[in-house]
């Protein structure tokens, strides 16, 4: 099924070898080229076989033989490359003898692949040939271009049609709306410049609407673009009335088109539209905005054209067609007439959308308001009672998590029981397969009489009946055709092609069988191809249906087979992680890069950008789902959909791509020396999973053994020493121990010369081997949230280092030469006289930077930062040796163009208007600003999306947000502004604010204008006086989630650091 994955990985390695290396042995390059060509032929055959759905016993035997050849070749290719690297960091040519040996093995590879080709040719009756050499990267780009084109082409055609519609003689406003930057302006500009549009309208004007635009500014800007009107000089001297009269007269006599770009509030735009409203000459106004309410207010009679993102984070999509089920589930959860604990089971025999329904309801505002405490638990077969308790307790808002893993079973159970008796809760038990899980939890839960509820999803109706005999299960079945079609159109987003779509509607419904998950998978495949090719693709899906499989399994296989080859190993890699595990996207993408899944050439796209493109493509194809977002709305965590996991973890194992040790018994592997386990994921301890001879060929080890105990984890050290002693380091390139408690690392770690990724985040380590700087291939070193305070200067010898995560550590010496590959460096400590200050200029291509500096070095640090042209995210702290904030310097960074995310910890004596202008996220902490910063920030930063004012950032008593300021702000947090007494929000300020959090502002008495925040969805108050809370609640008086917490976890405090594992978090998207 996935044999092409290891073939394509080996092929990319050989191609990279040909791109980078010079061979002195005659004929060796030709032999490598021949091997690559033979692999290309086999790859073309494998793709064709999948397209034709060929699967015979002969082909299965052939694939097994091919796998042995491929894995052997991958091993000796890596060994060959590593021979030169063992000479040190200097790039030396391969020795003649090593080239001779490699040439001989290449010959063996060619013979092995040709033997398979011969078998195939006998079966097919014709020789294999190279097929279409379209690069899979290009295929991805074409798919994204196609998706974006079709995403906007329908809107563009609709816009043009409405502009030149002569049936409507009156003025019409046509709004282009999207919540993100999705091409509204470019679309409007393309239409504005079209020849037919220029010919249709007698005059045109384009106005970019800034936040401080006055009505007179509108009039002047428009009149300056009119032909044969008035001179620019005379326009500048006119009064507002003269300008209005001039424009009105001209607009009554000429058919015009005006574009108002990036409109945030309605006041000025509405005034202009009212002025021109009497024009009856088929004139038009195009308005681009992020706010749907603005569009409706400007012209209630004209329906806006909405543009949606390619990656849809909306969890409601999968519940299209399930509206009645959602309504029933919500009503049973909020049943005030029944205070007893009730279990509501959502039942369906197939992967039919049970989890999606539960998650949709779990995240609703009214449910979050009803249940102050919620927990989500995906129930794995391997979870023991203790595991269940730990996962649940880590989601409690008031539990101190330190040393939780060290508690006894009785202590954990008693803690949970006490909490549940005092608080109304909602718990989701997802994918329950037996009643045993409920019987374990019923003790702590059953006595609750406070309106608490449990949602349980299961395929087994008997489980549902046994769990709560008094509650009838909510049964899900396949969608009827009408609702299936509605879901398909919502997911694909091509409603404007209704006539053409009707031609393929019957076949689409036939393929999907009313299964929501099959519908979104097919939609993902079709979204990447042109509409003219849809029929052929749908016919292929119908032809490949296997009657021995379920309809969903058929669609899963088809969706996977349609992936470009470069995406297949990326997708299979997610099955290394436990089922339903929330994977940090940062971690996943860097692991992909370390594995070498992509082939890069000099001056091509940055590897991190390529990885993100592949990630986004898998999301668009619905093969990866977003689990959680950052505060700015970008994806933070992801996971493989549960309905795909069980299938693909087995298929990945079958082809030898990986092995997952997911039970507490020892692993077993084949005894064949020709078969190896290249990637191993271990959840229960390295001792039982790495004791076999396969260790010699292991290339990646990822551990999820996060149980904290008194003793350090010595098994990791034993495992690594065994690898080194057995020369088992040729392929080993990934060591990911994130969350493993204090693993013991060997002093001779540098022996693992091929190591590219070392993940030690949240391990609690106190030190790391000095030899960690002697790894020539190292790309990612993650030491964040450890107790390590220094790194050897030899780390700069790792010229391939791209991502260095440290925890305010010092490095004594800077690099001696430029480090052009370094993309991420956080958080580096720079002392008062540290030579590292001058070393910052060596990091020419850093995109994300975190620094802690001393006040004496603050100005020079700022000057160095200003010279890092590609910097996008900066976390800058200034404090003395005792941790107290000292002065930051901003002025040198004022003109930085690419910086969009800025976190500042330290006193700000500079003018606040020295901040860079293009910020989208700004966090201030301990700034001690004496003057209200909001009027300056609101005008200075029109692109600001997230604003966080943390402890002592402002020490004044009054704060005001002015009208038309912060037009794009969607999240605002105010923490511990202890002197703040009054906060005023003017009408039209922060029109897109969705989430507001106020914490520990104990003197805040008056919040005039909160009720004017029309877009506000969630207001979180923590440690706020009750009279303030009551006043806010009275003023708002609408459907907003308002919570007031008097206690909060110390993990939320930006000043506190605990030596503990990060708590598991529920699957919430804000």
Image (spheres, rainbow, N blue to C red):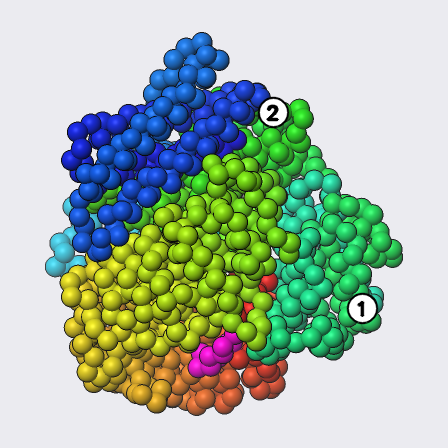
Q: Mark number for residue 326?
A: none
User: In the image, 346: left or right of 214?
Assistant: right
Dominant secondary structure (helix, strand or loop) of the stretch shown in magenta: loop
Task: Tell me whether the residue at label 2 lies in contact with that at label 1, contact meaning CB atoms closer than 8 angstroms.
Answer: no
Q: Nearer the viewer, mark 2 or mark 1?
A: 1
Instruction: Answer few, some or many: residues within 10 Å of disc 2's Cα (few below 14, many 20 plus, some between 14 and 19).
Output: some
Element at badge 2?
loop
Decide whether residue 991 is among the magenta residues: no
**Residue at x 57% of width, y 35% of height:** 556
The residue that label 2 is drawn on is 545
Q: How far, Cα to Cα, is label 2 from label 1?
A: 47 Å
> What range of the chain is rendered magenta?
1051-1060
User: In the image, 835: left or right of 141?
Assistant: left
Asked if residue 843 is positioned above or below residue 563 in the image, the reply reads below
User: In the image, 477: left or right of 976?
Assistant: right
Where is residue 887 drawn, in percent x and y? 26, 85
In this view, the residue in front, 80 or 131, is 80
Asked if residue 112 is positioned above or below residue 2 in the image, the reply reads above
Q: Residue furthest right?
A: 470
**Residue at x 70% of width, y 40% of height:** 350
Q: Earlier in the sequence, mark 2 or mark 1?
A: 1
Asked if residue 310 is positioned above or below residue 413 in the image, the reply reads above
Q: Is residue 304 visible?
A: no
In this view, the residue in front, 841 or 410, is 410
Where is residue 730 drawn, in percent x and y? 36, 48
In this view, the residue in front, 153 or 792, is 792
Where is residue 654 drawn, in percent x and y? 55, 37
**Residue at x 20% of width, y 70% of height:** 814
The residue that label 1 is drawn on is 443
Element at badge 1?
helix
């Amino acid at each position: 099924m996935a044999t092409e994955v290891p073939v394509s990985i080996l092929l990319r390695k050989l191609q990279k070898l040909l791109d980078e290396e010079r061979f002195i042995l005659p004929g060796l390059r030709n032999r490598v080229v021949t091997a690559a060509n033979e692999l290309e032929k086999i790859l073309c055959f494998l793709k064709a076989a999948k397209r034709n759905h060929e699967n015979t016993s002969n082909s299965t035997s052939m694939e097994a033989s091919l796998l042995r050849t491929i894995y052997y070749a991958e091993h000796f290719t890596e060994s060959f490359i590593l021979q030169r690297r063992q000479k040190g960091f200097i790039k030396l040519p391969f020795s003649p003898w090593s080239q001779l040996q490699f040439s001989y093995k290449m010959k063996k590879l060619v013979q092995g692949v040709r033997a398979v080709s011969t078998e195939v040719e006998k079966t097919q009756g014709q020789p294999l040939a190279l097929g279409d050499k379209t690069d899979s990267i290009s295929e991805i780009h074409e798919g994204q271009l196609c998706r974006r084109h079709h995403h906007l082409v329908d809107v563009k055609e609709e816009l043009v049609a409405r502009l030149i519609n002569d049936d409507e003689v009156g003025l019409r406003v046509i709004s282009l709306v999207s919540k993100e930057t999705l091409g509204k302006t470019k679309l409007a500009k393309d239409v504005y410049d079209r020849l037919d549009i220029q010919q249709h309208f007698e005059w045109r004007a384009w106005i970019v609407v800034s936040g401080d635009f006055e009505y007179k500014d509108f009039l002047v800007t428009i009149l300056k673009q009119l032909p044969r009107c008035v001179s620019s000089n005379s326009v500048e001297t006119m009064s507002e009335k003269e300008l209005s009269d001039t424009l009105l007269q001209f607009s009554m006599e000429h058919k015009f088109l005006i574009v108002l770009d990036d409109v945030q509030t309605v006041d000025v735009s509405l005034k202009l539209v009212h002025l021109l409203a009497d024009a009856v000459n088929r004139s038009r106004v195009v308005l681009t905005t992020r706010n749907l309410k603005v569009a409706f207010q400007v012209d209630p009679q004209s329906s806006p054209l909405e543009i949606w993102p390619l990656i849809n984070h909306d969890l409601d999509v999968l519940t299209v067609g399930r509206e009645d089920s959602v309504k029933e589930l919500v009503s049973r959860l909020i049943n005030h007439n029944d205070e007893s604990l009730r279990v509501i089971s959502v039942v369906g025999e197939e992967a039919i959308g049970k989890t999606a329904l539960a998650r949709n309801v779990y995240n609703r505002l009214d449910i979050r308001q009803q249940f102050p405490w919620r927990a989500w638990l995906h129930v794995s077969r391997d979870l023991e009672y203790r595991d269940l308790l730990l996962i649940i307790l880590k989601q409690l808002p008031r539990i101190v998590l330190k040393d939780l893993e060290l508690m006894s079973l009785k202590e954990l159970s008693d803690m949970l029981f006490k909490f549940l008796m005092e608080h109304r809760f909602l718990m989701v038990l997802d994918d329950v397969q037996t009643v045993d899980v409920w019987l374990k939890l019923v003790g702590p839960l059953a006595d609750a009489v406070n309106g608490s509820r449990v949602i349980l999803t299961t395929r087994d109706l008997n489980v549902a009946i046994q769990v709560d005999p008094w509650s009838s299960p909510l049964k899900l079945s396949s969608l009827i055709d009408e609702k299936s079609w509605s879901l398909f159109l919502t997911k694909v987003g091509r409603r404007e092609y209704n006539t053409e779509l009707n031609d393929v509607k019957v076949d689409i419904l036939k393929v999907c069988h009313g299964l929501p998950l099959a519908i979104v998978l097919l939609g993902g495949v079709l979204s990447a191809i042109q509409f003219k090719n849809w029929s052929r693709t749908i016919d292929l899906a119908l032809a490949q249906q296997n009657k021995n499989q379920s309809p969903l399994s058929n669609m899963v296989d088809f969706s996977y087979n349609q992936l470009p080859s470069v995406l297949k190993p990326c997708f299979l890699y997610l099955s290394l992680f436990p089922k339903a595990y929330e994977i940090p996207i940062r971690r996943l993408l860097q692991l992909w890069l370390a594995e070498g899944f992509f082939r890069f050439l000099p001056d091509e796209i940055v590897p991190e950008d390529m990885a993100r493109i592949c990630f986004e493509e898998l999301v668009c194809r619905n093969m990866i789902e977003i689990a959680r977002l950052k505060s700015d709305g970008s994806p933070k965590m992801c996971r493989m959909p549960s309905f795909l996991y069980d299938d693909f973890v087995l298929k990945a194992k079958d082809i030898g791509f990986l092995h997952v040790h997911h039970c507490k018994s020892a692993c077993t592997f084949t005894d064949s020396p020709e078969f190896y386990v290249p990637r191993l994921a271990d959840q229960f301890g390295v001792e039982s999973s790495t004791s076999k001879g396969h260790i010699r060929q292991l290339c990646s080890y990822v551990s999820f053994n996060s149980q904290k105990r008194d003793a350090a984890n010595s098994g990791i050290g034993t495992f690594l020493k065994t690898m080194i002693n057995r020369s088992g380091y040729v392929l080993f390139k990934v060591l990911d121990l994130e969350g493993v408690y204090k693993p013991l690392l060997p002093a001779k770690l540098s022996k693992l010369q091929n190591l590219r990724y070392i993940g030690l985040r949240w391990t609690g380590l106190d030190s790391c081997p000095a030899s960690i700087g002697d790894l020539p291939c190292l790309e990612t070193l993650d030491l964040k949230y450890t107790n390590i305070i220094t790194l050897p200067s030899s780390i700069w010898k790792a010229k391939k280092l791209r991502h260095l995560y440290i925890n305010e550590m010092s490095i004594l010496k800077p690099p001696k030469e430029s480090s052009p590959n370094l993309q991420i460096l956080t958080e580096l400590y720079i002392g008062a006289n540290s030579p590292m200050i001058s070393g910052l200029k060596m990091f020419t291509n850093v995109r994300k930077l975190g620094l802690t500096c001393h006040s004496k070095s603050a100005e020079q640090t700022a000057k160095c930062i200003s010279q890092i042209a590609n910097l996008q995210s900066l976390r800058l702290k200034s404090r003395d040796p005792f941790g107290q904030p000292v002065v930051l310097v901003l002025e040198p960074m004022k003109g930085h163009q690419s910086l969009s995310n800025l976190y500042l910890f330290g006193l700000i004596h500079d003018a606040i208007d020295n901040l860079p202008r293009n910020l989208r996220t700004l966090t201030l902490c301990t700034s001690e600003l004496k003057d209200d910063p909001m009027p300056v920030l609101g005008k200075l930063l029109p692109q600001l999306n997230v604003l966080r004012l943390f402890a002592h950032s402002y020490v004044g008593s009054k704060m005001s947000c002015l009208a038309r300021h912060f037009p794009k702000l969607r999240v605002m947090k105010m923490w511990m502004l202890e002197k703040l007494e009054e906060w005023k929000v003017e009408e039209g300020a922060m029109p897109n604010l969705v989430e507001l959090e106020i914490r520990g502002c104990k003197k805040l008495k008056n919040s005039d204008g909160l009720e004017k925040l029309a877009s506000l969805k969630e207001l979180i108050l923590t440690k706020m006086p009750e009279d303030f809370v009551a006043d806010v609640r009275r003023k708002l008086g609408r459907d907003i989630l308002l919570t007031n917490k008097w206690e909060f976890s110390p993990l939320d405090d930006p000043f506190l650091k605990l030596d503990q594992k990060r708590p598991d978090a529920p699957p919430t998207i804000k």
